[in-house]
Amino acid sequence: MPMQAQDVRWVKEPRLSLMDRLYLPSVVDGILTTGKHLVKTLRGGEFTQQFPEVEPKLPSHYRGVHRLNRDEQGRVKCVACYLCSTACPAHCIDIVAAPSPWPDREKYPEMFVLDELRCIYCGMCEEACPVDAIELTTLYDLTGLSRQEMLFDKEKLLSVYDQTTQAGTDPARTHRGQLGPASEKAADVRLPNPQ
Amino acid sequence: MPTVYVNDQPVTLGEQERLNIIQAAAKVNVEIPHYCWHPALTVVASCRMCLVEVGEKKPDGTVVMQPRVVPGCQTPAKDGTVVVTNSPKVKEAQAATLEYLLLNHPLDCPVCDQAGECYLQDYSYRFGRAESRLKDDKLQKPDKDHIGDHIALFTDRCVMCSRCVRFTREISGTSELQIIHRGDHAEIDVFPGEPCNNKLAGNVVDLCPVGALCSKDFLYKQRVWFLKDSPSVCPGCSTGCSIRVDQNKNIVYRLKPRFNPQAQGHFMCDEGRFGYKYINRVERFRAPQVRIGKDLVPIGWDGLLHKMKRELQESVPNGLAAVLSPWLSVEEAYLAAAFFKGLSPQVTLALGPVIKVGAEDHYPKGPRGEAPTDPKEIKFTIRAEKCPNRRGVEEVLKHFQGEVVGFDQVMKQVETGQIKAMFIAASSPTAWISDEQAKGLDKLNLLMLMDLLPSPASQRAKYLLPSASFAEKDGTFVNHADLAQMIQRAILSPGDVRPEGRVFMDWLERRGLFHAPSLRQEIAQKIPAFAALGSGDLGEWGVFLATQREPGAVAASAGPAKPKTAAGNKK
């Protein structure tokens, strides 16, 4: 849908005051911060992170390498709906869907390839997923020797799930701990009651 | 003139126009949601989605409204009818209907193939309510794989509009589908062992407004929002059904019929629907080839056309024939004919083999599978002539040569040795030459061929140029009833394939690119038979070549006689 003219809001840059235009207060402000840190360091405090000797503790919403979650039976949770690849602004997700071999589901990804080099780690795939199958983990130190190596396929993405859940860094944080509404049997679907 | 008032807007109807309220409202772009009503099918008013308030404007100006909402599909629009589609009462009725329809719907949009072109989604978004208030478990019915070779039924998604059932009863006449059980338990099904495999069966998938009937051929191949569509014409037979080519990343995934009252109506046959697959076949020629010794060797285009042109020029005195297949577009035939007649007027131009399979197949069928006897009853015809543009190529040949020489006549001249060199633009995805006929080609000194797929002729060709399929070029096809329609390029050709028109342009040493609209204008000026193409753009429905012909009469013989219903429903 093209954007309508009335939906566009024009914002004017706020004018700088005299103090802002002098820049001196900001400079002093910066020097003060540096001074405070200097004093604290001299007193024995630590501000520098000793990476890579000490691994940083990242918050659980950090957006690192992706993983494909497993359901309680260990199968891939993804239902190949292509919503992640539709939402992806970098077009880095490539899915081939097929009728699922399991009776409780209609569709599953025969192939799921995610280009970790092309990805911009925005987390839109995670948001788009209706079954909480794709998630971004706190794994941040992703390396590889070739571009080919950085194309993560279904097995690789599932292994990231195994690795991160076993290590305890990224516990399965899906809402239900089971398949989402799209993959559940129709009888199990309970829509929120508005009362 | 009868006037209908839709949400206070006056709609003037034609004197003989018989519309229902949905169609009348569509004239002023007021959409009345509906599932079960379809312009080509009978009215059942069972889905209750098109409920509107209806009243009557009396001659003294007072308006008397009916106390309850009524289905718009069933209510005729007549002089003084007042329709209200946006009152709270109507909105409430629409929301309630949708809530009912969704009671047992599994809401599995992420895995449903219809998502993105689903009328349940669209109408829920626009007319429905956000939540369901159902506390009980949803009724879950098993999916059915046995409905047909090309049809899968996801029973729980069905809204019981019965469009598919009515289609098999009214249009195909084969009556395979039916509704079994009652009330909540109603399901679409077939008689055991009698699957829905008639030649029009694929249409029930298009008719299904929700994701209940899915095409097995397209199932889970693509999400529909990735597909880009271009209007085109089905090349499967000389009916020339208007279609839409749906592609993504240069792969054609499906063909869908496009409404055209002048050509075929709303539908298309399965032969055409699934007949596009040669486009993606690996056997297709992807580069020009030259015979070196016994083998055909792929070579590049560099200098090739120049060399071929010289050989063609040299072979004129020995007798040269150019065969233009009925699979070429009008523009390509025109360029080819202009080139060969420009080489020398002695060059024989011939029409390629016109393949006919069986007889005309008219629908709806009777109870014993017999075709309708009364031409007025015919609602769809699959033609025996399995090529898209015989009429167009014939008209071009008539202009350049005065007569149409058939392929058999040319082969006889080859037999007698009058013709020693031949250029065949076959471009045909069907088998167009038998082994027997191809043996006759052995007498030639030079055979140049343009084709899509290997054939007995390609084994004998010295030069072989790859052809582009109908989805890879712009042009014009003229159907059996002289209706000229545009085809448009939907995808890029695979490999090193150049559309035929480009090759002929090169040979003619014409400047510029192959631009179908301007070529059409040129053809319209030069060939009187094609005067109707003068504007260059033939529009959505195409134009009839012969102006003395009544368009209505042709439409009646061509398909469903609904030429004047400009319905808002283009499903």
Image (cartoon, rainbow, N blue to C red):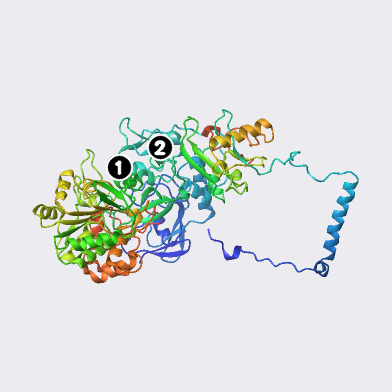
Label 2: how many Cα within 10 Å (few below 14, some 14–19, many 20+): many
- Total numbered labels placed on residues in the image: 2
In this orientation, does residue B197 appear? Answer: yes
Residue highlighted by disc 1:
B169
Q: Nearer the viewer, residue B156 or B285?
A: B285
Residue B119 position, x and y percent, is: 46, 48
- Residue at x 19% of width, y 62% of height: B314
- Residue at x 24% of width, y 65% of height: B339
The disc numbered 2 marks a residue on which chain? B
Q: Amino acid at mark 1?
A: Arg
Quarter of the picture containing the N terminus of chain B is: bottom left
Q: Nearer the viewer, residue A71 or B168?
A: A71
In this orientation, does residue B571 appear? Answer: no
Chain-order first, disc 1 or disc 2 = 2
Q: Nearer the viewer, residue A68 or B99?
A: A68
The disc numbered 1 marks a residue on which chain? B
Disc 1 and disc 2 on one polypeptide chain: yes
Q: On the rendered structure, is B337 left or right of B21?
A: left
Q: Amino acid at mark 2?
A: Leu
Residue highlighted by disc 2:
B153
Residue A125 position, x and y percent, is: 58, 45
